[in-house]
Image (spheres, rainbow, N blue to C red):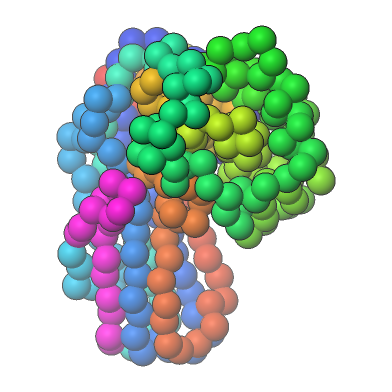
Amino acid sequence: MEPTGSNGTGTWRLRVVHTTGYRYQAPVVQSYNEARLTPRSDRWQNLVVTRIETTPPTRSFRYTDYWGTEVTSFDLHAPHTELKIVASSVVETGETVKPVDGASWADLRSEAVLDRYGEYLEWTRYVPRHKELGQLARDTRKGLKPHEAVLAVSKLVHDRLTYKRGTTGVHSSAADAWQAREGVCQDYAHLTLAMLRAVGIPSRYVSGYLHTKADGKVGETVRGESHAWVEAWTGGWWGFDPTNDIEISPRHIWVATGRDYADVSPLKGTYSGGKAAAIEVSVEVTRLA
């Protein structure tokens, strides 16, 4: 998602329509897929209604994965040359998320925290250990409380990286983005995670959507795409958007969390048949109230 302006205030009701279309060079005879497109219903937002439809129709079932994300699994066994997935949801978003000042650096090093949140301190392919980033994170956190360090690291990533499409790809890591000094929201999130984990702050990747207008009018539809930001644990979980260097506001719609993008990919699966010739994705976000 491209950088936007400051936050909106109050609570919003939003409708999101996320459409993905695939076309294949030859008929696909069987397809197995997972969709992580259902917004969360928790203390930050209320999921009013959600629906995922496919063309051709498929058999589907839902389950909650290890990270707490609702997954819609569907398979198709009739030959097809096109597949369209439309995820529609209405959510009521909450107040702007504020930092949690509830843990000291000693608390973060405690056995209880390391045991409970250790998975959000691990290195991954997208968030690898990186000597330069680690040193930069340690320098940035000096004299700061953990929640202040989250804000400082997010600002540093926002300031050091230039938002640019095409430099990085869906498989790029935080190290790749740092070397290029360019990237998109996925890269901003991965870079922030790499630095936070380097100083021992449990942190996770968040996928979702963002209404692009802080002063969005009721009934107005904006076009966008999936967005990404981070959550950190500093005595409680709270989120921040390093791409825009802003708080998580009523304009943000939370969908999935995990260690990195691999845990929250909106659509993934496997199929047997012709090579995919084209993939089209569109997202429309409408403020309803």
Tell me if residue 35 comes above or below residue 285 in the rendering: below
The part of the image, by quadrant, that contains residue 200 is: top right
Query: Residue 81: x percent and y percent?
Result: 42, 82
The part of the image, by quadrant, that contains residue 180 is: top right
The part of the image, by quadrant, that contains residue 133 is: top right
Tell me if residue 185 comes above or below residue 155 in the rendering: below
Residue reaching furthest front?
111
What residue is at 18 percent from the left and 64 percent from the top?
61
Tell me if residue 154 comes above or below residue 9 in the rendering: below
Judged left or right of residue 205, residue 162 is right
Nearer to me, 279 or 245: 245
Determine if residue 183 is in view. Answer: yes
Nearer to me, 143 or 285: 143
What residue is at 75 percent from the left and 51 percent from the top?
176
What residue is at 63 percent from the left and 40 percent from the top?
194
Query: Residue 78: x percent and y percent?
Result: 28, 86
Query: Residue 33: x percent and y percent?
Result: 35, 70
Total marks shown come to 0
Determine if residue 224 is in view. Answer: no
On-image quarter of the N terminus: top right
On-image quarter of the C terminus: top left
What residue is at 33 percent from the left and 10 percent from the top?
10
Judged left or right of residue 65, residue 183 is right
Query: Residue 189: x percent and y percent?
Result: 58, 38
Determine if the magenta segment contains residue 261.
no
Tell me if residue 168 comes above or below residue 121 in the rendering: below
Tell me the magenta residue range: 62-78
